[in-house]
Image (cartoon, rainbow, N blue to C red):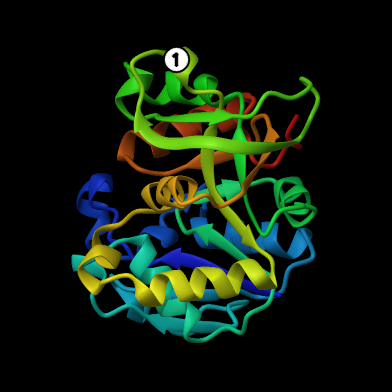
């Protein structure tokens, strides 16, 4: 099983503190963000990850509990899809978990994800609006559309129908992508072939949700693993201040508490 963490970006929206260190080393509750992630991976029974580095990569050179570091030299000109492509040169076609370097999750999310039935799966949070309302004055300014095939309310496995567009109404967003993807061996091989064929300029401009939207348009079967809460995303300095306060009081997106 391969575990890849995409952590090459600078995190410029964090302000001046982003200059000196990788975004994944931003401290939360007195510990680097990456260490919280590594705790989650271990608790979920996953081995040490391959870490795709870019900005301030030297700070991660000897980080404990990381299996390997891959440098993405064009991190400033490209995004997470290019980082994922760089990682694929160092992994075999086997089960592959891809994790954003700026999110935290409870281990249960990873356990659910590994039980996916389709070749490609992603976790989605149906309680996303609770977190976005805390983070943004207008939640729709940042959230992306996401629709799934109808199913029973308690169904955790849903077919993804649409993702990645701007939404005019909250009702257009059934859940929010959480920065976790899983590919089985066949899905990993298909991912590799698709990215290899993509022109370099497109690969460097593409983000993950845009890639997923293109796959849907091409007829790929994508499985959404649905739950609620128990994860965080770090984009802005205000996120960090909010999380420090909220975690001290207890709130539904505390990644240390199980998802619903």
Q: How many marks?
A: 1
Q: Is residue 180 left or right of residue 162?
A: right
Q: Which residue is mark 1?
A: 170
Frontmost residue, 93 versus 3: 93
Picture coordinates of residue 63, whole percent (x, y): 51, 78
Residue under the point 47% across and 85% down:
89
Q: Nearer the viewer, residue 30 or 138?
A: 138
Residue 126 lies, with reference to residue 24, above or below; the image says above
Q: Is residue 20 visible?
A: no
**Residue farthest along the front direction in this orientation:** 219
Q: Can you tell which quarter of the image residue 145 is in? A: top left
For the residue pair 136 and 89, the one nearer the viewer reads as 89
Q: Where, by quadrant of the figure, is residue 206 drawn?
A: bottom left
Q: Is residue 31 left or right of residue 256?
A: left
- Residue at 46% x, 78% y: name it: 87
Residue 12 in percent (x, y) is at: 23, 52
Q: Nearer the viewer, residue 77 or 216?
A: 216
Residue 46, x across and y down, in percent = 73, 68
Compared to residue 134, the image places residue 11 above or below, namely below
**Helix, strand or loop for disc 1:** helix
Query: Residue 72, position in %: x, y?
Result: 32, 78
Q: Quadrant of the N terminus?
A: bottom right
């Amino acid at each position: 099983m391969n575990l890849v963490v995409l952590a090459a970006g600078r995190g410029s929206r964090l302000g001046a503190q982003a200059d000196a260190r990788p975004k994944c080393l931003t401290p939360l509750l007195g510990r680097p963000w990456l260490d919280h992630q590594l705790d989650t991976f271990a608790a979920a029974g996953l081995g040490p990850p391959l870490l795709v580095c870019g900005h301030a990569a030297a700070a991660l050179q000897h980080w404990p509990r990381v299996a390997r570091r891959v440098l993405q030299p064009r991190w400033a000109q490209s995004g997470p899809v290019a980082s994922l492509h760089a990682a694929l040169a160092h992994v075999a076609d086997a089960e592959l978990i891809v994790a954003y370097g700026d999110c935290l999750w409870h281990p249960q999310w990873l356990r659910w994800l590994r039980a996916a039935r389709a070749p490609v799966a992603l976790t989605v949070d149906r309680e996303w609006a609770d977190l976005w309302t805390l983070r943004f004055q207008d939640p729709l300014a940042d959230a992306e559309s996401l629709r799934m095939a109808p199913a029973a309310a308690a169904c955790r496995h849903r077919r993804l129908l649409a993702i990645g567009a701007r939404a005019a109404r909250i009702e257009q967003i059934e859940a929010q992508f959480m920065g976790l993807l899983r590919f089985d061996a066949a899905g990993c091989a298909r991912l590799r072939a698709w990215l290899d064929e993509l022109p370099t300029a497109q690969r460097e401009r593409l983000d993950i949700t845009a890639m997923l939207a293109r796959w849907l348009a091409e007829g790929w079967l994508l499985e959404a693993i649905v739950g609620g809460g128990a994860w965080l995303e770090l984009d802005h300095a205000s996120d960090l201040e909010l999380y420090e306060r909220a975690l001290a009081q207890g709130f539904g997106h505390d990644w240390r508490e199980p998802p619903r």
